Every structure is written in C-alpha cells, then in structure tokens.
Image: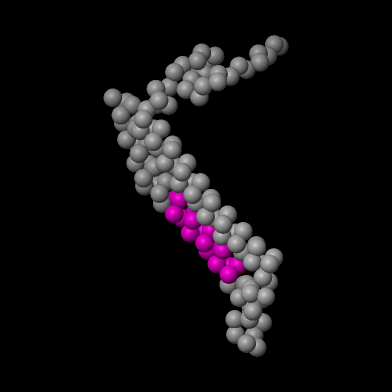
Amino acid sequence: MEQAIPTYQASAQHIAVDGQITFNPLLDDPQFLALVHSRRTFSWSLTIVMLLVYFAFILTLAFSPALLGRPLVEGYPMTLGIPVGFGMFVFTFMLVLVYVVRANTAYDRAISQIKMGASQ
C-alpha cells in the first residue's frame, strides 16, 4: 500500500477537495477580511486585559504581599487577598461572557450576511 505525501499550498485561499485544489472566493471577500480582523483584534484585546489583571495580581503578591495580606476585618482571619483572588475568577468569567455575547450577536450576524452574499 503506497501513501502519498501531502502537498500544501502557500496560500490559504485554496482548498483541497479530493486531491484537487479549488479557489475559495470567500477568503478574498472584503467583509470576511474585515470580520477576521475585527474578531482577532477583539480577542487579542481581551487577552491583553486578562494578562494585565493576572500579572498585576501575581506581581502584587510578589512585591507587596502585605497589601493582600491585610485582614478585611480586624480580628478575623480572612485577608484582602481572598476576595481579590475570587474576584479574578469572576473577572475571567465576565470576559468570557463578553466574548460569547459578541460572538453570538455581532459575529454570527456578520457570518450569515457574508454567506448570504456569497450564495447570490
């Protein structure tokens, strides 16, 4: 049994179907390119925000542990670091929620408009 080594094109604008390479016009559509750029920019923005919050927490722990080690109420063992840590979980879930809402509204709408335009 002989196996062929797959060959890959340098351009992402071609799709291999049953060994034949065909051109996909959607990949050159200006609306599609704008959608890809918008989605990528939004995703990277959320990623940067999450990394800033995460590293701010870690750096605060490293360089100013007394700040997060202060008790919330004198005489009780709970420190400021505990609600801040849980707040990071809430913040992460909120960022995911923001992305999901945007993906399910703006991006899905844009994708359906691009598909409708391509089918005509």
The residue sitting at the left extreme is 120
Q: Height in image: 28 above or below 73?
A: above
Name the residue nearer the viewer: 31 or 2. 31
Residue 85 position, x and y percent, is 60, 67
Give the vertical position of 22 relative to 41 (above or below).
above
Identify the image quadrant of residue 112.
top left
| Prevailing secondary structure of the magenta residues | helix
Colour mapping: one colour
Residue at point 39%, 32% (across, down): 32
The magenta segment: 84-100
Q: Whole-percent x and y of residue 92?
A: 53, 58
Q: Dividing the picture into quarters, in which one does residue 62 lie?
A: bottom right
Residue 61, quarter of picture: bottom right
User: Residue 96: within the magenta?
Assistant: yes
Q: Closest to the observer: 66 or 94?
A: 66
Classify residue 45 as left or right of residue 76.
Answer: left
Q: Residue at x 31, y 31 (%)?
A: 116
Could you tell whether 69 is left or right of 16 in the image? right
Direction front: furthest residue: 63
Q: Is residue 78 above or below residue 95?
A: below
Quadrant of the rendering where the N terminus is positioned: top right
| Residue pictured at 55% horizontal, 18% vertical | 9
In this picture, residue 56 sits left or right of residue 24: right
Whole-percent x and y of residue 72? 59, 81
